[in-house]
């Protein structure tokens, strides 16, 4: 029996199906399962000739799957390689090994993807884009659209094909010591940029001031606070929200409602006054 | 400024593409068209006022700078923020005659976005629930070996979910939003407590977005230092975001090199046959 080898065409089709379809038919019950099935279908059709074999292979991928889909391309690539090995009669690879690997990888990869991509790359790119869009300039959004799509499209392709070539070893590229060092450095870069985003784009200000009998202002609380540390009030509110959500396990929506209450009391007491008029 | 039927329909189509889960795929849909900054550009083009659209989008973007959806739980819906919130906020700014670049304009936009985004989560759950029906069809297809049908299930039928949960709500909200904005304007005076609270909340809401991000990266108190480092560069030294990124990049390289020096030293110690305690290798990822 000749060695079966997946064609470039089938692999490309599989990648495209994953790239586009991983979340289109999302439900809370089977999050990315159908995206995964669509990604495996071109491969299974090429590797197996009979309907029965195809059916058996596809049944492997009906198990629940959910991860961070961009970085998760590597898992799809790895399973493409495994499926090829199984079609060539490698006895070490069966449905259980494939699903064990998928289940074992989706958690860690989701953690890496969420912190690196959604928690770091996107905020950095958006932070820069926000800076470029002051005054309503279209440079900001265009920068984000181009840079994000280039990085992610090529990144996902790279991970998919690395996963296919290297199999399980590709995962070391993501979780090895060097990868961890790179990731930590990028995350702290992101944290710094987010600090700057907070200082530039968020501004919580108090309007509290005291005047003497002659109508001269002798206390302007905002100036006092800023002379201690510029933006201290904004930073304090960020820490307060962080404390509520991280330490008190309050949901973001409830945190927003607490801010509504804080603002309402503050307005009544004259601490906050946005200075509105017609 | 008003929103015509055609404009509302185009906004509705973009809402279908930009949702999470959406028909644009998550790279181009959710993570590009669904970001309020990009949506600001799109809404600006559709409604014919690009600068206002981008400024409103930018204001809302800060609130949702890190919309992490771990395990598919959402605290805000991108299609609602981006394609209902932004058009209505643009209308409101025009109606009140506020400058979108001013602190007041930004506060109004963020309040609007957060309100619509939070209520909009119902659309997310609606879409995901309707998709269960298509997935049911998909399971039957897999059982029968009718695999070609999977493409229809994954990429075709969810359009119906979006027609119901994205398209119609967007068109309706954009159309009835115009009189609602006018009514609010006449019934609630700008210097009254409700409006003052609304605007104050608007300036505070981005803190929640930043805090969600910090929750991801801060595990111990010293993890706050990079955040305050960046904050200080911008607030005290007045650097813009691109400059801050360059400075932060320098520190990131230093940190990486330090870490790698440690790793290489350990490898060298192992290679020279020394018995190295391997325990601290098993770091959590």
Image: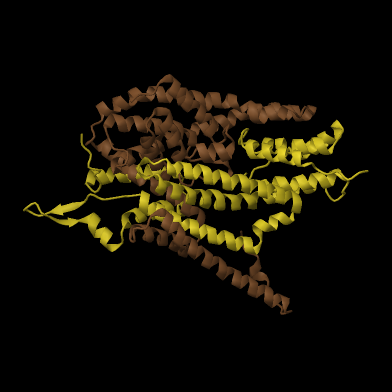
Q: Is residue B54 left or right of residue A26?
A: left
Q: Is residue B83 left or right of residue B257?
A: left
Q: Position of residue B68 (x, y in %)?
A: 52, 46
Residue A83 falls in image quadrant: top right
Colour scheme? by chain
Which sits in the foreground, B54 or A212?
A: B54
Chain B drawing hue: brown
Chain A drawing hue: yellow
Query: Is B152 rendered above or below residue B253?
Result: above
User: Residue drawn at (18%, 52%), measured in percent from left and top?
Assistant: A209
Any part of residue A41 in sight: yes
Query: Is A187 rendered above or below residue A29?
Result: below
Q: Position of residue A114 (x, y in %)?
A: 56, 49
Q: Position of residue A217 (x, y in %)?
A: 13, 54
Q: Position of residue A269 (x, y in %)?
A: 22, 46
Which sits in the foreground, B98 or A65?
A: B98
Quarter containing the N terminus of chain B: top left
């Amino acid at each position: 029996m000749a060695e079966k080898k997946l064609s470039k065409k089938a692999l490309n089709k599989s990648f495209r199906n994953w790239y586009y379809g991983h979340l289109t038919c999302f439900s809370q019950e089977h999050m990315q399962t159908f995206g995964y099935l669509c990604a495996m279908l071109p491969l299974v059709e090429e590797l197996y000739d009979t309907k029965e074999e195809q059916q058996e292979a596809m049944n492997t991928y009906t198990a629940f799957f959910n991860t961070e889909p961009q970085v998760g391309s590597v898992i799809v690539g790895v399973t493409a390689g495994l499926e090829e090995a199984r079609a060539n009669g490698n006895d070490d690879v069966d449905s259980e090994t494939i699903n064990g690997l998928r289940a074992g990888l989706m958690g860690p990869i989701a953690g890496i993807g969420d912190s690196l991509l959604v928690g770091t790359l996107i905020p950095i790119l958006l932070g820069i884009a926000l800076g470029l869009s002051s005054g309503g300039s279209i440079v900001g959004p265009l920068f984000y659209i181009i840079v994000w799509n280039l990085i992610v499209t090529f990144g996902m392709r790279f991970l998919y094909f690395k996963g296919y070539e290297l199999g399980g070893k590709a995962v070391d590229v993501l979780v090895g010591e060097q990868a961890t060092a790179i990731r930590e450095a990028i995350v702290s870069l992101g944290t710094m940029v987010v600090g700057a985003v907070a200082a530039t784009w968020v501004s919580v200000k108090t309007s509290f001031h005291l005047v003497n009998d002659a109508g001269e202002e002798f206390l302007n609380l905002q100036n006092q606070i800023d002379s201690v540390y510029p933006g201290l009030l904004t930073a304090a509110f960020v820490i307060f929200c962080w404390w509520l959500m991280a330490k008190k396990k309050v949901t973001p929506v409830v945190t927003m409602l607490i801010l509504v209450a804080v603002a309402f009391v503050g307005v009544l007491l004259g601490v906050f006054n946005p200075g509105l008029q017609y | 400024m008003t929103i015509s039927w055609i404009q509302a329909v185009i906004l509705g189509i973009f809402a279908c593409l930009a949702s999470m889960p959406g028909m644009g795929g998550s790279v181009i849909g959710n993570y590009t068209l669904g970001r309020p900054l990009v949506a600001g550009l799109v809404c600006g083009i559709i409604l014919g006022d690009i600068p206002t659209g981008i400024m409103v989008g930018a204001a809302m973007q800060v609130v949702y700078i890190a919309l992490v959806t771990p395990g598919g739980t959402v605290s805000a819906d991108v299609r609602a923020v981006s394609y209902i919130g932004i058009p209505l906020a643009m209308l409101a700014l025009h109606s009140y005659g506020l400058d979108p670049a001013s602190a007041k304009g930004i506060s109004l936009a963020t309040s609007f976005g957060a309100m619509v985004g939070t209520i909009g989560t119902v659309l997310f759950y609606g879409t995901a629930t309707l998709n269960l029906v298509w997935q049911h069809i998909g399971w039957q297809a897999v059982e029968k070996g009718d695999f070609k049908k999977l493409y229809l299930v994954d990429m075709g039928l969810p359009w119906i979910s979006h027609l119901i949960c994205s398209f119609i709500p967007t068109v309706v909200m954009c159309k009835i939003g115009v009189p609602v904005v006018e009514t609010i304007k006449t019934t609630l005076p700008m210097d009254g407590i409700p409006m003052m609270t609304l605007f104050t909340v608007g300036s505070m809401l981005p803190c929640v977005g930043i805090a969600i991000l910090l929750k991801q990266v801060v595990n111990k108190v010293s993890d706050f230092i990079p955040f305050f480092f960046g904050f200080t560069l911008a607030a005290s030294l007045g650097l813009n975001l691109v400059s801050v990124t360059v400075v932060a990049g320098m520190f990131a390289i230093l940190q990486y090199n330090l870490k790698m020096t440690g790793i290489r030293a350990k490898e060298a110690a192992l290679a020279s046959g020394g018995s190295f305690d391997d325990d601290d290798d098993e770091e959590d990822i």
